[in-house]
Image: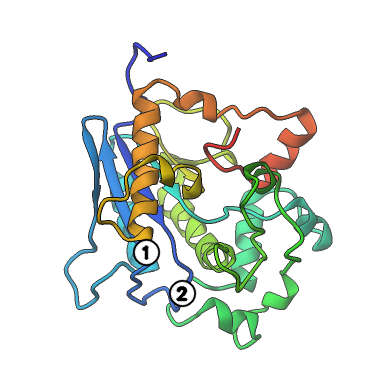
């Protein structure tokens, strides 16, 4: 049923992420699509520079600019935003997402220009060994998808482990620079706040087969599918139901720490 009040957001941004190389590397796998209620998704290319493709730093800086604008945007990013409860228990960390972001970045400084995920894994930089986990540990949202791999499951096809370890420090960067102008779901609350932009974790495989591939690469199509689904679901008046997944009180408490994947009920 359509919501007579119209869409909640005025812009939709889908990002297919990549944890390859360094934050300043031009990466073919980093793709951005944006849409609006009356504009289907279109690819956003990086600003003119010697680099042909987006960099992780470039996307973060672009998001700060776009989300500083007044029109509320819904952003979906394809990597884990947090870790399983077991991680917090094993490392005796408070169940608090901002504290988690700070602690993780201290051990995995993958937002530094010359730092790759693999050099932290190999103990060249940082102290990743002190903040790691088992590939057997999965978040409840990952289990609910039926297919998503653990955020610690490196070096296998379809894994988001490298993207997650590369991307989490950039969530911290966005949070520091945007402050209260943007909400990170569900850590800042489960309900939509009208008039404010929102950033959520997404899993493009939930939707990519629902849209024709046309001539897009797999990475382009993943980003396109995110923007298209966010737009379509908001236009249909169904978006709010996905911000209220079916969770028991104990599952809800876990998801407050582990995060959730938008679109998973």
- Between the residue at mark 2 and the residue at mark 1, the CA separation in whole angstroms equals 9 Å
Relative side of 192 to 90, left or right: left
For label 1, the residue is 30
In the image, residue 193 sits, relative to residue 203, either above or below, namely above
Of residue 11 and residue 233, the one placed in the foreground of this image is 233
Q: Residue at x 34, y 11 (%)?
A: 4
Left or right of 256: which side holds 42?
left
Quadrant the N terminus occupies: top left
Name the N-terminal-most of marks 2 and 1: 2
Q: Is residue 195 visible?
A: no
Q: Residue at x 51, y 79 (%)?
A: 116
Question: Residue at the spot x=34%, y=14% of the render?
Answer: 5
Q: Which residue is mark 2?
A: 20
Q: Secondary structure at mark 1?
A: loop
Q: Position of residue 233 (x, y in %)?
A: 40, 29
- Residue at the bottom extreme, as displayed: 124
Residue 72: name its quadrant: top left
Is residue 174 visible to the viewer in this orientation of the structure?
Answer: yes
Q: Tell me the crowding category of disc 1: few under 14, some 14 to 19, or many 20 or more residues within 10 angstroms, Cα based.
A: many
Give x and y (percent) for residue 215. 25, 56
**Up-down: is 191 above or below 98?**
above
At a point 57% along the width and 80% down the height, the residue shown is: 118
Identify the residue at the far left of this view.
Answer: 48
Q: Is residue 255 above or below residue 155?
A: above
- Which quarter of the rendering shows the C terminus? top right
Figure quadrant of residue 105 = bottom right
């Amino acid at each position: 049923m359509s919501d007579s009040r119209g869409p909640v957001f005025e812009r939709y941004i889908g990002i297919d992420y990549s944890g390859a190389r360094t934050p300043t590397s031009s990466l073919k796998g980093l793709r951005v699509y944006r849409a609006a209620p009356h504009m289907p998704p279109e690819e956003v290319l990086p600003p003119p520079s010697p680099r042909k493709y987006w960099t992780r730093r470039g996307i973060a800086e672009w998001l700060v600019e776009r989300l500083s604008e007044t029109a509320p945007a819904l952003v979906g990013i394809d990597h884990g935003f947090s870790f399983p409860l077991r991680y917090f228990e094993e490392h005796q960390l408070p169940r608090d997402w901002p504290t988690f972001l700070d602690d993780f970045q201290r051990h995995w400084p993958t937002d530094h220009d010359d730092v790759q995920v693999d050099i932290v894994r190999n103990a060249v930089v940082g102290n990743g060994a002190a903040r790691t986990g088992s590939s057997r540990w999965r978040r409840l949202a990952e289990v609910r998808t039926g297919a998503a791999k653990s955020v610690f499951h490196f070096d296998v096809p379809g894994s988001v482990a490298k993207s997650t370890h590369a991307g989490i420090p950039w969530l911290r960067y966005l949070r520091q620079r945007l402050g209260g102008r943007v909400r990170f779901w569900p850590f800042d609350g489960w309900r939509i706040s009208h008039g404010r932009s929102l950033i959520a974790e997404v899993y493009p495989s939930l939707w990519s087969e629902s849209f024709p591939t046309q001539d897009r690469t797999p990475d382009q199509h993943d980003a396109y599918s995110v923007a298209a689904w966010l737009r379509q679901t908001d236009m249909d008046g169904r978006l709010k139901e996905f911000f209220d997944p079916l969770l028991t009180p104990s599952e809800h408490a876990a998801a407050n720490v582990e995060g959730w994947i938008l679109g998973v009920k």
